[in-house]
Image (cartoon, grey):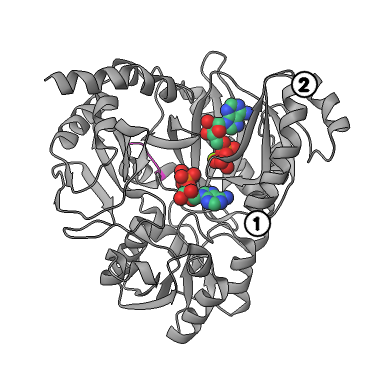
Amino acid sequence: MSISSILVANRGEIAVRIIRAAQALGIRTVQVHSAADRDMLAVKLADQAVEIGPPSAAKSYLNIEAVLKAARETGVDAVHPGYGFLSENATFAKAVEDAGLIFIGPRHDAISLLGDKVEARKVASRAGVPTVPGSNGRIDDIAAAREIVEEIGFPVMIKAAAGGGGRGIRIAESMEDFERHFPQASAEALAAFGDGGLYVEKVITRARHVEVQILGDGRNAIHCFERECSLQRRRQKVWEEAPSFRLPESVRKALCESAVALAREVGYRGAGTVEYLYDDETGAFYFIEVNTRIQVEHPVTEMITGIDLVQEMIRIAGGAELSIRQEDVVIRGHAIECRINAEDPMRGFLPGPGLVEALGVPEGDGVRFDTMLYDGYQVPPFYDSLLGKLIVWGESRDHCLDRLGEALDNFEIRGLATTIPLHKALASDPSVAAGDVHTRFLEPWLETEFKAFVASKEVA
Ligand code: ADP
Ligand code: ADP
Ligand code: MG
């Protein structure tokens, strides 16, 4: 059955992105929103809008009953969950299916299997994908953990099986550390994710975060190459690229094929991402997790492959077979995405919502801005600080960096502090230009190079 109407169960820039994809496919859209989001761009763009609750996300965007009620009352065929909120909630996916509607994403059983990071490691192993050395299952008590941890060697990471968004991770440098962190981590995971289950992984000290975009229709699966997401703060991505750099062709091939093997292992349906850590000194890569949803950084893949991933996931959910063959997916040029957050990088990334007094968006060949902003928009204080994403394409990585620098110089969001200055500094940094980065590059760099960059601007 093909989809003729979609309810967007999300907000912000991704809601806008989904509405645009639906409109391009001639699909009617219904946008749900909280009382704090009456003025958001997606509400203005959708064919219909339904208020589903107060500002608190728990009572609106995370309220399964309220979302389903809006879906029933507006008679939509399908629900797109975006990212965050209910996007990886198997209970929600099942409730949508039970209501006779289409969930635009994987089947609920695939979400619960791959959403459990311990189970996902087992799936990866079955598919022959190398995983980070660590525990084979959940760790139930400290006594059992001691042996495993001693075998792995310190430092180790204690990770929540249900964790996500960079949360639910702790590092232990010694056994003493481990014994202290373990019970706290479990209690925290239980409070944050409703599941106190933990596992351990060896810390890969100098790793790059490389991930593979996959698409499946339940029978066949393909990859759309990889993204490089090593520039992170607090384990959250700040800047992403496609393709990765300084990646030998043989490694790229093995990495992408391993993601397809994993997708085939579970008969994956929809768009997804298989995340890895890559050690560029040894050439080894290790599976870390699967995100069973569209990701924030999906546009860089779209820019280099010409594939519209959101349209593709809607078509697949409507029952269509994959319309793209693996041999037709080719990399053209290079793309970089900068996450533009309402945070002040000069003041410890203090979040600061406010009124958009003037918006000057860069334009030109290969420049795309996926956003929720418009002139005069009041950014509400209740949600994630992501305002939008600047995505720039160039024929080569150097060309892309040049264009990015220019785009950032022509970018102005007046009225609130944003991460634009951080991206300007990164775009002109020699280590970034050389691709000499890893997941622990950005945090110390903020204390040294970035501070110097800011000081030089202040003098000038
Ligand atoms: P991506 O994996 O697409 O790069 P992020 O990791 O930044 O994106 O997550 C996207 C959004 O989803 C963010 O708003 C993040 O805070 C949220 N998120 C991701 N996983 C979870 C989770 N398990 N629980 C709560 N929020 C999450
Ligand atoms: P989340 O579900 O929160 O996205 P991930 O397992 O994807 O958690 O890890 C988030 C980030 O934490 C990674 O991108 C990486 O920077 C770091 N990380 C995770 N596991 C390890 C590890 N074993 N060694 C080193 N860094 C890791
Ligand atoms: Mg992750």
Q: With respect to residue 255, does 441 lie above or below?
A: above
Q: Tell which of 230 and 247 is nearer to you.
A: 230
Q: Quadrant of residue 23?
A: bottom left
Q: Position of residue 152 (x, y in %)?
A: 75, 21
Left or right of 105: which side holds 424?
A: left
Magenta part of the protein: which range?
Answer: 328-332
Q: For residue 276, say whether it is visible.
A: no
Left or right of 427: which side holds 223?
A: right
Please tell me how crowded label 2 is: few (under 14), some (14-19), or many (20+) other residues with Cα within 10 Å.
Answer: some
Q: Tell which of 75 and 375 is nearer to you.
A: 375
Q: Position of residue 5 (x, y in %)?
A: 40, 77
- Which residue is under mark 1? 110
The amino acid type found where label 2 is placed reads Met
Give the residue drawn at x 30%, y 36%.
Answer: 335
Secondary structure mostly seen in magenta is loop
Disc 2 on helix, strand or loop? helix
Q: With respect to residue 276, does 436 lie above or below?
A: above
Give the residue drawn at x 19%, y 35%.
Answer: 408
- Which residue is under mark 2? 175
Disc 1 on helix, strand or loop? helix
Q: Tell which of 447 and 137 is nearer to you.
A: 447
- Magenta stretch contains residue 408: no
Q: For residue 360, say whether it is visible.
A: yes
Contact (Cβ within 8 Å) of mark 1 with mark 2: no
